[in-house]
Image: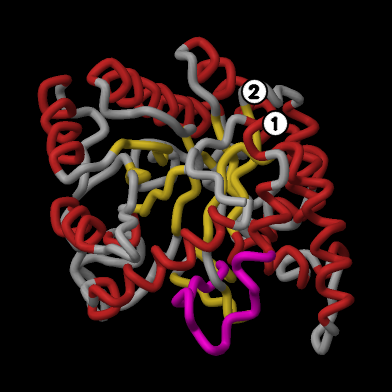
């Protein structure tokens, strides 16, 4: 049965993540061009309803004036889109720093959350933002460093996340921590669950599930002791493991990314062993996108999920600028929505 209330969003950060000016990097794609590519997509009269948005340069200066942020909101609305979930600039090199770090690093992390809450308020008051959360992670690539003292290091991330959640609560916002195998303390489904339970603020801090990243949770990359599947698995074994994982994390899930994964991992500098997003119709894709999404979206309305978002980071610019890419993605999103 179709659920027309579940809105379809596209992410703007594929135009930024993995892009840059260093040797071998492709240039970023501007916000307006990403909006235009998204606006051009259409499948049987259906278009994207909105966008999820990364709060950092070159798309946005998170410390921009109120008027500059309102102008960005006007630009997004002029393309026919609402704004949904926001990505707080919590990483070293942006505004923030490691949630596992020193008091100074923690303060930078919390500053990034405060900035994101400020931007959210401006977008909300301007009428441009209708739904969504603020996304964070531990901003700590040092999985091996975390493993030197897991209890101590998880406790430090819990402390940072509790403080961040209180900031969000004071601003009427919710935080969603994205599970991904490169983030220390969040690098397996079990460690992610331990972190969420350690914070213990489900009304304010929940989980952001991404189909590509959570597939690698099953395989135990960066945490073999928590693997639920082994290579060569059968379909029966896959869905039994998938149900086991989603039953644990779904109650915490307040934001959801549609994606595909071909089973590979790749790193970029210190960003080691991160999940490889691939095209929605990639013949090497490991996931039945519609079926896998249904495990996460069961009872989604009770958890306040009002939209789903496509995430496809690190695609070549030629792929991103091909209109057929976005039509294929939109078609996959519609199938996910209509299956709910």
Q: Is residue 237 above or below residue 81?
A: below
Residue 290 in the image, given as x and y percentages of width and height? 61, 65
Residue 14 in the image, given as x and y percentages of width and height? 34, 61
Front residue of 107/176: it is 176
Residue 47 in the image, given as x and y percentages of width and height? 31, 55
Front residue of 323/175: it is 323
Is residue 101 at least partly visible in the picture? no
- For the residues labelled 1 and 2, say whether their Cβ atoms are less than 8 Å apart: yes
- Colour scheme of the rendered structure: secondary structure
Front residue of 131/138: it is 131
Q: Is residue 298 left or right of residue 2?
A: right
Q: Quadrant of residue 195?
A: top right
Q: Is residue 225 above or below residue 179?
A: below
Residue depicted at x 36% and y 54%: 10
Question: Label 1: few (<14), some or many (≥20) within 10 Å?
Answer: many
Residue depicted at x 28% and y 66%: 19
Q: Which residues are magenta?
A: 274-291
Q: Which residue is mark 1?
A: 158
Most extreme residue toward the top is 170
Q: Which mark is residue 200?
A: none
Residue 281 falls within the magenta-colored stretch: yes
Residue depicted at x 37% and y 28%: 130
Q: How many marks?
A: 2
Q: Which mark is residue 162?
A: 2
């Amino acid at each position: 049965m179709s659920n027309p209330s579940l809105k379809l969003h596209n992410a703007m950060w594929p135009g930024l993540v993995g892009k840059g000016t260093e040797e071998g990097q492709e240039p970023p794609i501007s916000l307006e061009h990403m909006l235009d590519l998204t606006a051009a997509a259409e499948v049987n009269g259906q278009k994207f309803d909105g966008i999820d948005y990364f709060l950092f340069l070159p798309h946005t200066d998170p410390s921009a004036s109120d008027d500059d942020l309102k102008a960005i909101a006007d630009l997004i609305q002029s393309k026919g889109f609402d704004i949904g979930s926001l990505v707080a600039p919590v990483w070293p090199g942006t505004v923030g720093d490691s949630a596992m770090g020193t008091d100074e690093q923690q303060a930078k992390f919390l500053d990034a959350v405060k900035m994101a809450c400020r931007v959210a308020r401006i977008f909300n008051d301007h009428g441009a933002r209708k739904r969504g959360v603020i996304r964070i992670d531990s901003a700590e690539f040092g999985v091996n460093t975390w493993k030197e003292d897991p209890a101590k290091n998880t406790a430090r991330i819990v402390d940072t996340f509790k403080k961040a959640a209180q900031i969000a609560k004071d601003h009427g916002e919710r935080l969603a921590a994205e599970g991904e195998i490169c983030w220390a303390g969040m690098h397996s489904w079990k460690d992610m669950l331990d972190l969420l339970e350690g914070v213990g603020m489900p009304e304010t801090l929940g989980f952001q599930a991404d189909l590509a990243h959570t597939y690698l949770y099953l395989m135990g990359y960066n945490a073999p002791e928590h693997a639920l599947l082994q290579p060569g698995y059968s379909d029966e074994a896959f869905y039994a493991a998938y149900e086991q994982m989603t039953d644990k994390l779904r109650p915490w899930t307040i934001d959801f990314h549609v994606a595909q994964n071909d089973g590979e991992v790749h790193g970029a500098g210190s960003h080691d062993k991160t999940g490889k997003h691939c095209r929605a119709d990639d013949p090497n894709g490991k996931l039945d996108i519609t079926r896998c999404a249904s495990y996460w979206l069961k009872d989604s309305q009770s958890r306040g999920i009002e939209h789903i978002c496509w995430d496809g980071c690190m695609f070549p610019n030629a792929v991103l600028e091909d209109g057929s890419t976005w039509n294929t993605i939109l078609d996959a999103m519609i199938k996910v929505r209509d299956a709910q």
